[in-house]
Amino acid sequence: MAGPSLSVKRYFPVLDWGRGYNGETLTGDLVAAVIVTIMLIPQSLAYALLAGLPPEAGLYASIAPIVLYALFGTSRALAVGPVAVVSLMTAAAIGKVAEPGSSDYIIAALTLALMSGALLVAMGLFRLGFVANFLSHPVIAGFITASGILIAASQLKHILGVDAHGHTLPVILGSLVSDLGAINWLTVLIGISATAFLFWVRGGLKPLLVRIGILDRLAGHLARTGPVFAVAVTTLAAWWYDLGEAGVKLVGDVPRGLPPLTQPSFSPDLWLALAGPAVLISIIGFVESVSVAQTLAAKRRQRIDPDQELIGLGMANIGAGFTGGYPVTGGFARSVVNFDAGAQTPAAGAFTAIGLAAASLTITPLIAFLPQATLAATIIVAVLSLVNFSIFRDAWTYSKADFVAVTATVAVTLIVGVEAGVTAGVLLSVLIHLYKTSKPHMAVIGQVPGTEHYRNVLRHEVITDPHVLQLRVDESLYFANARYLEDRIYAMVADHPELEHVVLACPAVNAIDMSALESLEAINARLEALGVKFHLTEVKGPVMDRLKRSHFLDDLTGQVFLSQHQAMRTLGGAQQGARAAE
Amino acid sequence: MAGPSLSVKRYFPVLDWGRGYNGETLTGDLVAAVIVTIMLIPQSLAYALLAGLPPEAGLYASIAPIVLYALFGTSRALAVGPVAVVSLMTAAAIGKVAEPGSSDYIIAALTLALMSGALLVAMGLFRLGFVANFLSHPVIAGFITASGILIAASQLKHILGVDAHGHTLPVILGSLVSDLGAINWLTVLIGISATAFLFWVRGGLKPLLVRIGILDRLAGHLARTGPVFAVAVTTLAAWWYDLGEAGVKLVGDVPRGLPPLTQPSFSPDLWLALAGPAVLISIIGFVESVSVAQTLAAKRRQRIDPDQELIGLGMANIGAGFTGGYPVTGGFARSVVNFDAGAQTPAAGAFTAIGLAAASLTITPLIAFLPQATLAATIIVAVLSLVNFSIFRDAWTYSKADFVAVTATVAVTLIVGVEAGVTAGVLLSVLIHLYKTSKPHMAVIGQVPGTEHYRNVLRHEVITDPHVLQLRVDESLYFANARYLEDRIYAMVADHPELEHVVLACPAVNAIDMSALESLEAINARLEALGVKFHLTEVKGPVMDRLKRSHFLDDLTGQVFLSQHQAMRTLGGAQQGARAAE
């Protein structure tokens, strides 16, 4: 009997790893699941708060999506669920179409998850994963940093116990300041203590545990569960001292139960309004997820399939849309913990889902007394690790163009909003790239004496021939630079009436599109009218194959030489005596 | 005494050519001016009709703009004035904001000319001429062809004597068909005779004149004035037989006089509404103009300065806005005639302007009896020479990507409109270009036996080493392809556990942006975790300079070799015995 066919395996990677499942992989997966579950409970509640949703939405968004990703995803260690940046983008997107706290708001979140999921699955089926590549590194780095700042700012209100709103830095800070009179000092105490504790947990807990004799690996895992202690202690304090009565905002009643079956909206108006955000959330989520998955896979010489990742993430989001969640993606922190704790297969994710389902059946009544300030502290500590200003310095040093892109992304994200920020960054990167390639580097070259090498006359002492212009162009020729090449050649020919040959060296020309072909034909025709012959050298195989399909080679007044040296041996009669600058 | 400074000369080229003016250049310019004037009278009237403006607007648009271009432009032979494609675009743009025939319509045309002029001057001062390069050859060719079809279709109503409207092919043809019952057979007779005559003039008149003993050159000039005969004969017939009473639409009263001083609108609403069209008209006009100017300049080894051309064209359009005209540009046909007739300097343009001013003072009363069908015939014959379907075949043969761009441009222009057509074409070209460079050609290479050359293992019989992966990438590395490179390398390394070295050959890498640098660092780090060393070879000077400004070279586990052969002599211990496919 034949096994499942290859194409079925491609779309259901579970059929691949499921066959080798055994006791050893089970142990690894179970240990990882326990640790990740403990870590995810406060994180899920906190990110739901960030998205403006009821806390249980965060738990629900971590259950069905994890299982669906386990079935369809290709990464062995990726942990899918709510993450900070996507939660912020969700809040920004659905805040425009519905009032936070309303049932429309929750339905908009479900709809956004469904749309984002459908889009990701479609991109996977059509193998459009490459679209994510248009998010350049500076744009992503700038966007993540700006998002971290926005998120931290938006959580300050919970730490201070005041009201604030908005999705841009000026609005958030403005509304914070205007409400500072209403500050609640008990909330501030909880918020600041929790923040300080969590920062200490990040850096100081693990060394302490190791010093008191706990094994290094176990100490690392215990340190990851630090937020749970903060949650437990502040919840207990809130219950014991009845802090809710004292004006400390608590999470409040959370329904106990498994994720409900929910119904996203199919209203065309809502879909139209959410279309732009859905595209951006899908792509940002995919980029974050796939880079985490790739990092982890490479560590074990495993591979992920980016197009199948789109399907896995897409199914996870569709699942979130139908089970009370909101848009999810593969998170960095949780995936690393999952990997470090020994997860061997996506089954670890399924066990995590079971753990979270158990939690939402049992501990939700206790969560009612959890202060919102504690969750805000969890978020702030998590996102401040995203903020990284060194990208500005690195970009400034390496490339001014990249510096412009990162600065624009950060500024627009902070001042105009997350969607505008990503869009501005992508458009600017593309424009800068096109601008740079539209004025390619060109060098007049000559022979390095005694060799067959030809180099830039400005950098080297070389032999040239006054009757032959030898020009090397260091870029593929395409519409954006074709006319620039024409201009340059015409200018040089106009300045040197003694020219008889123009030789274009093409070792770095990887492609010639139809506009550039037209320009080459124009150059050839105009040079012919002036009695100057036009030659090419070092044309690459694929480029030559393509030129052969046009009339260019028939019309060419000169020849195509295999090497510059061969061209100059044929054309350079006056070469021996003539030296540059003599 | 010093002459005008260089920078003054740059902005006023007239100071340059004016100093060498003499009797010989004067004769050439005067002859050219007479011929161009005779050619321009019917053409100017016809294009104004196409733009939906009163006929005198065409004459006015040919007077002040020509003089201003003569002062500021750099081409010696370019003739500026109304042209078919820009007239069509003008009609499409102002038809959206005002009713044809109303005074608002005329003011909108003036405003569009002023905006377009201001934009061109600004682009010239900021040296933004390169923006025009984003119109690829297939997009321009497709757009011109589609515009020619639209123009010819829009003029059919004048030939048939029916009413029709619209700026897209389905609307124009639909409204033509629905009004076919109102066809005027006398108009059809005039229209078809004039069209047939003009087609014959194009092809048959010159040989006939030569046969009856007229010199070749003079015959050519006489043939160019053919449309004037058609105009004269049909005007005379309309007057003699009182064809206006018989339902033949005539041009009607045209005010006699010099171009009036007019006042464009400065209403912010109108400027906002016309901003998009003004940008497109400016760029399309500039591209058309500069390619004509360049063709003619190259024939005499003269140069044009594209940035100063922007200023010249911009001043011409500003002039059109204040003297009763509408957007103008350098026309192909008239410039070629001007050049062929012996124009030596821009003074020929000034003389043409004087001729046209004289015409608008004297002959305008005669024009009242000119049938619109004759002007429509002039337009149809002129624009059908723009229609060129061979671009489809050429693009299909040379490059499927260019075929997609040209097809989309033609289809969108015909069905949605001229502005949408150009925009779609430009966006699609950019996306196709980015897509192509996002999946660069990569080759695993090996040594050609007995040489120092390294070639693609798939194309050549080469020597490889199982412990060394030699990969050549044929594209600059930037954000759109950086992750693709990562994916490819990780996949290859995952498939070959015996690898010890990865060598990336970069002879065709003209740039490495920050995203690509990040990817190279990630590749280096992940390979290091697997015990594989990462090397680069044949890195270009400017790329190496930039890499030295980052930490990459410090962290690199391997080396940067000057040549592939040097790398393999150092790394390839097992090379001698191992041959590909053995």
Image (cartoon, coloured by chain):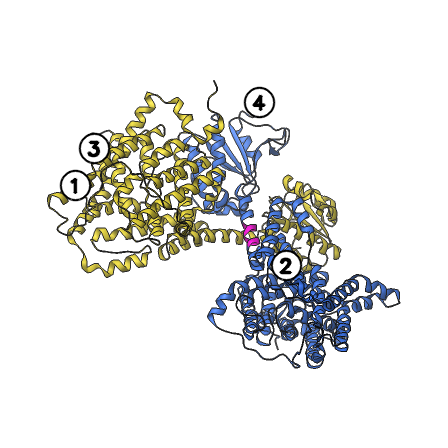
Chain colours: A blue, B yellow
Kindly indicate whether the residue at mark 4 contacts the one at mark 2 (C-beta within 8 angstroms): no
Badge 3: how crowded within 10 Å, few (<14), some, or many (20+)?
Answer: few
Label of residue B52 in the image: none
Identify which amino acid the numbered label 3 is placed on: Arg
Badge 1 vs badge 4, beta-carbon distance below 8 Å: no
Question: Which amino acid type corresponds to the residue marked 1 in the rendered image?
Answer: Val
Look at the numbered disc 1 and give the secondary structure of its residue: helix
Task: Tell me whether the residue at label 3 lies in contact with that at label 2, contact meaning CB atoms closer than 8 angstroms.
Answer: no
Does dot 3 land on a helix, a strand or a loop?
helix
Q: Is residue A427 magenta?
A: yes
Report which residue position mark 4 lands on.
A577
Q: Position of residue A305 (x, y in %)?
A: 62, 64
Distance (Cα) linking label 2 and label 1: 78 Å
**Which picture quadrant has residue B339?**
top left
> What subunit carries mark 4?
A
**Amino acid bearing label 2:** Leu
Q: CA distance from mark 3 to mark 2?
A: 87 Å
Residue tagged 3: B211
**Eyeballing the image, is A435 above or below A496?**
below
Does residue A278 lie above or below B255 as drawn?
A: below
What's drawn in magenta, residue-wise? Answer: A424-430
**Closer-to-camera residue (B77/A272):** A272
